[in-house]
Amino acid sequence: MTEEDNTTGLPEAPTTPTRSGFVALIGATNAGKSTLLNRLVGAKVSIVSHKVQTTRAIVRGIAIHDRTQIVFMDTPGIFKPRRRLDRAMVTSAWGGAKDADLIVMLVDSERGLRGDAQAILEGLKEVRQPKILVLNKIDQVKREDLLKLASAANEVVTFDDTFMISATTGSGCDDLIAHLSAKLPEGPWYYPEDQISDLPMRQLAAEITREKLFLRLHQELPYSSHVETEQWEERKDGSVRIEQVIYVERDSQKKIALGKGGEAIKSISTASRKELSEILDQPVHLFLFVKVRENWGDDPERFREMGLEFPKG
């Protein structure tokens, strides 16, 4: 049809159909799932820390490739659970995998299939969705060793495809996202084109502060800490006032979070405020408070705040 023939005045419908679907990222703790998610989305939607088990609930990051909308689900690392919170995280991870159109299993190439990675492979035998193996952190591993690792994984589970990438540098990531976009089914997009995550901003803000907490106190403060955004006020001058509470289980942990003369909490606040200002593109006034809440890890309300199902028993 020529421009003269189009008498409706409306733009012609695209000849290429849209595609959309959900891709679950699963793997052992610290395999690089959050780093990969942020890389593929092109923006920070999941916190990254060298401390394992930092992702607690499923975080969805939304990427557009060609005419495909890919909804990535960054799941908590799968590991042998010890606490109630651990059980909820592992259940959430497997639940996310079973709800997805495609499953990407991420393996730390340097660690290989030792420990939790081997157990995940065994669990994947019971999952019906198409599965893709992604070997991450390939920079320091010889190619022949990568090929052996890929072969060993495929002996346990038959993967449709195998990719070798570095989520940190981006090597191989373009090929991976192109492959995923072509594999997803035709259909309308689930989210607006400019949306990059389904995480409410209040929750994302709490996650960012929790990341800074881990980065600043990863050796001193254990996992028994939780951040909640309690107040969010948009001000007339275009800034936003945010109040957050860092919950810990003991007075000794509160002292660690505050630091000598409040040094630690000031450092955490400064780092979090800077990143939030960049994400929101507006000035941020951030106020952090540290409170002791004994055994918050057994409180169903805290689990709901994190988007986790409270495990009974």
Image: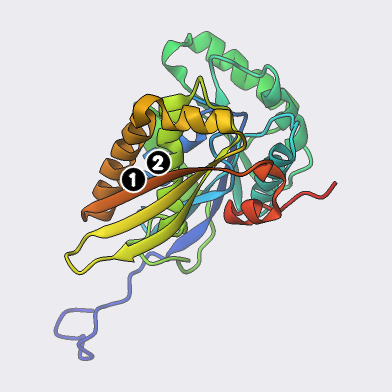
Q: Determine which residue is flagged by label 1.
A: 43
Position in image of residue 132 (x %, y %): 59, 37
- Whether residue 248 sits left or right of residue 121 in the image: it is left
Residues 184 and 303: in front is 303
Question: 190 above or below 222?
Answer: below
| Element assignment for label 2 | helix
User: Which residue is depicted at the point 58% across and 15% down?
Assistant: 111
Is residue 165 visible in this depiction of the protein? no
Residue 262 at x, y percent in the picture: 36, 31
* Residue 180 placement, left or right of 28: left
Q: Nearer the viewer, residue 157 or 259?
A: 259
Q: Residues within 10 Å of mark 2 (few under 14, many from 20)?
A: many
Q: Is residue 235 left or right of residue 105?
A: left
Quadrant in the picture for residue 114:
top right
Q: Which residue is mark 2?
A: 38
Give percent across and percent down for residue 80: 74, 29
